[in-house]
Every structure is written in C-alpha cells, then in structure tokens.
C-alpha cells in the first residue's frame, strides 16, 4: 500500500501521504519498507493509481501532499508529476496546498528540481544526514559531503523557497564538536526547516545486529541527551523554533503543515 490518508488537524483538513518504497540501496539503520528492484517502479505506479481511485474519500478536503519513502527521488521527474496530477484528479485540495517531496543528494538534479517546482511542488526535504564523509560512510549513505552541498546549491538555484534538511546525531564516537560542525554548516545555507533525528537501532536492521555483535559501541544515553539539548540551544540562537521533538523551523509559517497532522 503506497497511500495513507492522514488525520484532519485543527483546520479540519486532511493530509495525503504517498510512500515510494524504492531505494538504490537500503541504509543499514532504516526499518522503513523499501525495495531495491527499481524495475518494479512502473508496476508500483500503476498500482498506486488504482489505489487512489479506490480510496477517494467523499467530502474530504486536503491541504497537504507528502511524497516520502524510501527514496522518492529515484522517480523520474515525469513519474513524480504523474502522481501529483492523478492526486489532483482524485482528491479535493485547498488552494494553498503544501506539496512536499523527499530527495537524496545522489538521486536528484537541478533539472529535476526545476521541473518539480514548475508543476506544483513547493517544499523539498533533502536527506543530508551529515557533512562528514566518514559519518556518511558509516551510515551507509551513497552520497558524499560534496554531493550534499551540491544538492543544496542546486535546490536554491532551482528556486526552492521552502527547503528542509535532514540531519542525524547520536552516532558512535560522534562528539559534541562533530555534531555542532554539522549544525553550523547546515544553518549556513539558511534552510527554512531542519529535522534532526537521533540514530536508533531498530529491531531487524543491520545496525541492530552489528550493535549486538559488538561491531561498534552506541553513544551513551548521557551523550545523546547532551546532543539533543545542544541542538535546541544552537538552533534557537539562530532563529529556529522547535515545534516537534525532531523538527525546527524559522518561524511558525515555515513549519511543515504535514508533520502536524
């Protein structure tokens, strides 16, 4: 199932979540459902269109669309636009609908971002995780720090006005100085939104198995607590308001509406 109808919020409007369950390679810490067989993408999209036709709720007004994953940026630009166009045919949306897509630095380009914006996407979240190559390799990420920086520049050049960056903390041997370095670089780009996620060891993931086997020692609870607290202080000093445990925005108007469903 690739479609999820999120609960109505205080406005009475609902949110539409589309899960794209494909990745070039699955990250060892991730427990979200995903496949690496990209040749199945067309079949998935056909099934998604059928699902949209089946679950269209009468009388429901949506004010957000969120395309997550997986790695939605493995979609060709035309495929992502097909999802959006079909959603608009099937569902009723507010005029100011928030349309978000998650992308990874290794699977997104300036041209793709430009095309997405021209067809109604107005919010882009980039899975940066770190600006340090060693930590990126530990996390099993395919992109380099250089690629991460390039993706941010491409997003701004393409005209992304609501840019979100995802970062991770609590990695083994990650010091306060290491984490502050990532935060400092992220804020230099002045993203409208930051999501700072603590590394967790979910049952059944390679990371959890490696932890149990003693391949690395997780950060202590005290260390992780310190990194969490320093995150709030550091971002607050730079104009970012915490509105959920992992989410920060430059003012109320730039919060992710979908996150609050």
Image: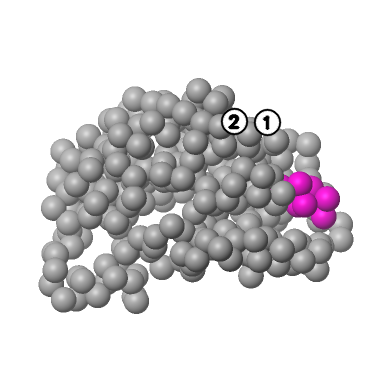
According to the picture, the residue beneath numbered tag 2 turns out to be: 114
Camera-nearest residue between 25 and 127: 25
Residue 26 at what x, y percent from top left? Answer: 39, 62
Residue 170 visible somewhere in the drawing: no
Q: How many marks can you see? A: 2
- Numbered tag placed on residue 118 in the rendering: 1
Callout 1: SS? helix
Residue 43 at what x, y percent from top left? Answer: 66, 66
| Quarter of the figure with the N terminus | bottom right
Residue 121 drawn above or below residue 225: above
Residue 211 at what x, y percent from top left? Answer: 20, 70
Q: Residues within 10 Å of mark 1 (few under 14, many from 20)?
A: few
Residue 70 visible somewhere in the drawing: yes
Q: Which residues are magenta?
A: 84-90
Q: Are marks 1 and 2 in contact (CB under 8 Å)?
A: yes
Q: Is residue 29 left or right of residue 111?
A: left
Please say whether residue 85 is one of the residues in the magenta stretch.
Answer: yes
């Amino acid at each position: 199932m690739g479609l999820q109808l999120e609960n109505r919020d205080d406005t009475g409007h609902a949110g539409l979540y589309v899960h794209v369950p494909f990745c070039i390679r699955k990250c060892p810490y991730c427990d979200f459902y995903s496949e690496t067989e990209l040749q199945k993408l067309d079949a998935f999209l056909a099934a998604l269109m059928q699902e949209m036709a089946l679950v269209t709720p009468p009388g429901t007004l949506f004010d957000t669309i969120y395309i997550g994953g997986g790695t939605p940026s493995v979609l060709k630009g035309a495929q992502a636009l097909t999802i959006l166009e079909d959603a608009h045919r099937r569902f009723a949306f507010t005029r100011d609908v928030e349309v978000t897509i998650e992308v990874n630095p290794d699977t997104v380009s300036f041209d793709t971002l430009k095309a997405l914006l021209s067809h109604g996407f107005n919010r882009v979240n980039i899975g940066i995780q770190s600006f340090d190559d060693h930590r990126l390799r530990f996390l099993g990420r395919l992109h380099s720090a250089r690629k991460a920086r390039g993706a941010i520049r491409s997003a701004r050049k393409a005209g992304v006005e609501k840019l979100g960056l995802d970062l991770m903390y609590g990695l083994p041997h990650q010091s306060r100085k290491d984490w502050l370095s990532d935060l400092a670089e992220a804020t230099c780009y002045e993203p409208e939104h930051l999501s700072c996620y603590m590394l967790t060891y979910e049952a059944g993931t390679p990371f959890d198995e490696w932890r149990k086997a003693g391949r690395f020692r997780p950060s202590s609870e005290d260390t992780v607590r310190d990194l969490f607290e320093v995150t709030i202080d550091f971002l607050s000093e730079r104009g970012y308001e915490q509105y959920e445990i992992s989410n920060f925005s430059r003012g109320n108007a730039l919060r992710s509406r979908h996150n609050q469903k």
